[in-house]
Amino acid sequence: MRLQVSSILLVAAALSFSSCATRIQGLTKSADFTYPNVKSGKLVVGGVTSVNGDVDYRKGMSLSNALKTQIVEEREDLSVTHAGMVAKSLGKEAYASILSSIENEGSLSPAQVEMLSAKIQGRRFLVFSKIENDQTNQNRRQIDKTDSNGNATGESEMVSSTSRSVDVSFLVYDLMKKEIAWSGTVNKRDTKESKFSVKKDSGLVSLVKAIKGTEERSTEDLYPYPEAPGQQPLLVRAFRGFAENLPEED
C-alpha cells in the first residue's frame, strides 16, 4: 500500500501560486508546505527519473543538479541540497530502490519514507521529479501569400515544423510529517519551423517534364522537417516552472 496524501491536502488543480508563475496541472499542497516551513526546514533534491526508464544514474545526477540550479536561481532565499547527499546517505542499493519506486509506482512506500526520514538529517522537504511524457510531432502546412490589400499573389510558402512536448511531475515529501507535501505536473512545449517558397511550374514546364519522364523530388526532399527541439532545455524550463511555484514570503 502506497503512502497516501493526508486529508489536510488542499487541492487546487491546474492553478499556480501567482498569475506569473508556470501553470501546475493537478496541484496538491499540504497546509504545512508554507514559506516559513520551507525556509527553516530546507530542501533537498531526491532525484530525477523517467517513466521510460531511460534515465541512468549519471544522467539522473546531472538532471538533479539542473533542478537544484533552477530552484536556487529562482529562489535565492531558500537552501537547496543536491541529490548526491541523498545517494550518499542511503547507499547505492537503497538509493536505486527509492528511484525505482518513484519511476514505477509514482510514490514511496511508508517504510521507504520512514527510512528517508531517519537517514536524511537537516533537510525537511525532499523533492523528486519524473519525466512522464516526451513526445515529438511533425506538421507541414502550405500558406498562400497575399499582398498588402489581402489579395492572393499566386505564390505560396510551405512551413515544415517539429514540436516537442514534455510533461514533468514533481513530488515533495515532508520528512518530518512523513507525508506528501506537494505534487503536480508541469508541461513545456517548443517548436522549430523551416519555411520554403513553393515553386509552381507553368503548364509548358509540366508538359516537358511529363514527356521526358523527369523524376519529381519528394515532399520531404523539398520541404524537410527541422530537427526536434532539445529535451534538456525543455526540462530546465519545467524545473524552473516548479521553482516558480514554491511558497513565497507573505
Image (spheres, rainbow, N blue to C red):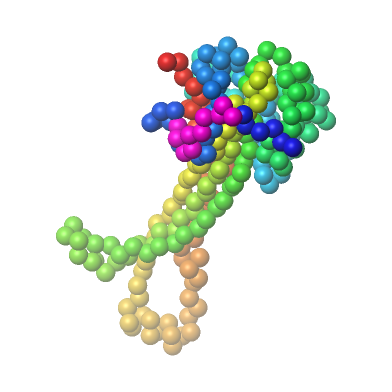
Choose top left, top right, bottom left or bottom right for residue 209. bottom left
Number of numbered discs present?
Answer: 0
Q: Is residue 22 visible?
A: no
User: Vertical placement of 27 versus 192: above or below?
Assistant: above
Spot occupied by residue 183 in the image (x, y as percentages of width and height): 57, 33
Give the farthest residue toward the left.
Answer: 149
Residue 15 in magenta stretch:
yes
Residue at (49%, 38%) from the top-left corner? 13
Instruction: Tell me what residue is drawn at x 59 percent, y 47 percent.
Output: 134
Q: Which quadrant, please, contains the N terminus?
A: top right
From the top left corner, tell me how far across and down residue 245 is, in percent.
49, 28
The front one of 214 and 20 is 20
Instruction: Answer with left or right where residue 176 lies relative to residue 148.
Output: right
Left or right side of 186 for 153:
left
Quarter holding the C terminus?
A: top left
Which residue: 44% across, 28% down? 17
Specify the segment rendered in magenta: 7-16
